[in-house]
Amino acid sequence: MGQVRVVTDSTSDIPPEVAARLNITVIPAYIQVEGRSYRDGVGLSREQFYAQLPRMTTSPTTAVPPPHEFALAYREAMTEADELIAIVVSAELSGMYDVACLAAQEVPELKVRVVDSGQVTMGLGWLAIVAAEAAANGRTAEEILALIEDTKPRTHVYAVLDTLEYLLRSGRVSWARAKAAQILRIKPLVGVLMGKVRDLGRTRTRGRAIDRLVEVTRSLGPLDRLAVLHSYASEVEAFRRRLVEDCSPAQLLTVAVTTIIGTHVGPRALGVAAVTAH
């Protein structure tokens, strides 16, 4: 039986120790901050980034890695495997999927399957983890791909943003432009559905927005996996305790979201990436 390795991109937010334990290759995206380009996670910490973000004179921009970086990662991973599954951020929100496919064409001698996760941050991360756990247990590529497709509809990402300002600047979400005038001062609740960021409602206070996020998460039912997501929000520990009490997930992680995602959601965001049991 051939060995399968999993490749993903850094917007997956998989903690480095988890990626290392499961032998997941993580390819960094790029971020441009105040005229300097950084590989995600190199030379600029997440905590530094979120502290500086409100004071930046120009908005950061993000970029996907070039195809040759994916191709190099494929070749390196294939030294220990017979087949690769590359699972990447939603094609609706990024060009990462196209780049991953181009790179696969550059290495036609390798068996590379590229999967559009339809997700972001740990929504993508959980799918890559599920795939890597299955690979470690000796599952075939076909079995792993089927497992990913089974897990996709059970994977949910929701977040409360402190402001719509950064999503508006990103230009990635059309409804943000349409509604900016009336909700810039209101706390939006957003979700990733069918690969797109959706407006799920808004409240006038941050406390009520967080309450609503807890309610939405609780309504999902029993959870196999839960990641508490934040961009250095002061309420993250209290929020985490509430979710543990209410949802009792089988597996729990707390993750400061990458600068690549943070460019679009801004500081003080709180969120969840949940995989339901059924």
Image (cartoon, rainbow, N blue to C red):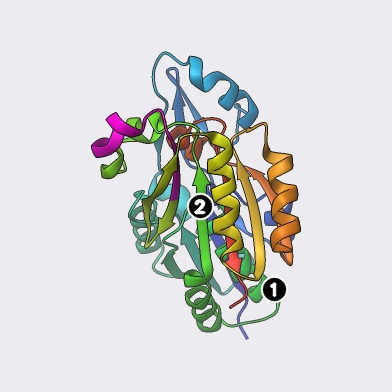
Q: Which mark is residue 14?
A: none
Q: CA distance from mark 1 to mark 2?
A: 29 Å
Q: Please, which residue is most extreme toward the bottom here?
A: 1
Read off the residue under disc 2.
158
Which percent across, then down, holds residue 184? 37, 29
Q: Nearer the viewer, residue 133 or 101?
A: 133
Q: Residue drawn at (28%, 29%), measured in percent from left and top?
A: 181
Question: Dot 1 lies on which element?
Answer: helix
Q: Is residue 180 magenta?
A: yes
Other residues around mark 1 within 10 Å, as few (<14) / some (14–19) / many (≥20)? few
Question: Earlier along the polypeptide chain: callout 1 or callout 2?
Answer: 1
Q: Does the rendering let one see residue 28?
A: yes
Read off the residue under disc 1.
136
Q: Does the rendering let one see residue 65?
A: no
**Which amino acid lies under the numbered mark 2 shown in the image of this protein?**
Tyr
**Which amino acid lies under the numbered mark 1 shown in the image of this protein?**
Ala
Q: Is residue 5 magenta?
A: no
Q: Residue drawn at (76%, 57%), measured in percent from left and top?
A: 245
Which percent across, then down, holds residue 248? 74, 63
Q: Quadrant of the N terminus?
A: bottom right
Tell me the magenta residue range. 177-190
Q: Residue drawn at (44%, 27%), measured in percent from left and top?
A: 32
Question: Is 3 situated left or right of 104 in this image?
Answer: right
Q: Residue drawn at (57%, 26%), measured in percent from left and top?
A: 50
Which percent across, then down, holds residue 18? 71, 55
Q: Quadrant of the C terminus?
A: bottom right
Question: Is 258 situated left or right of 29 in this image?
Answer: right
Which percent across, then down, holds residue 14? 63, 52
Image position of 154 with respect to 47: above or below: below
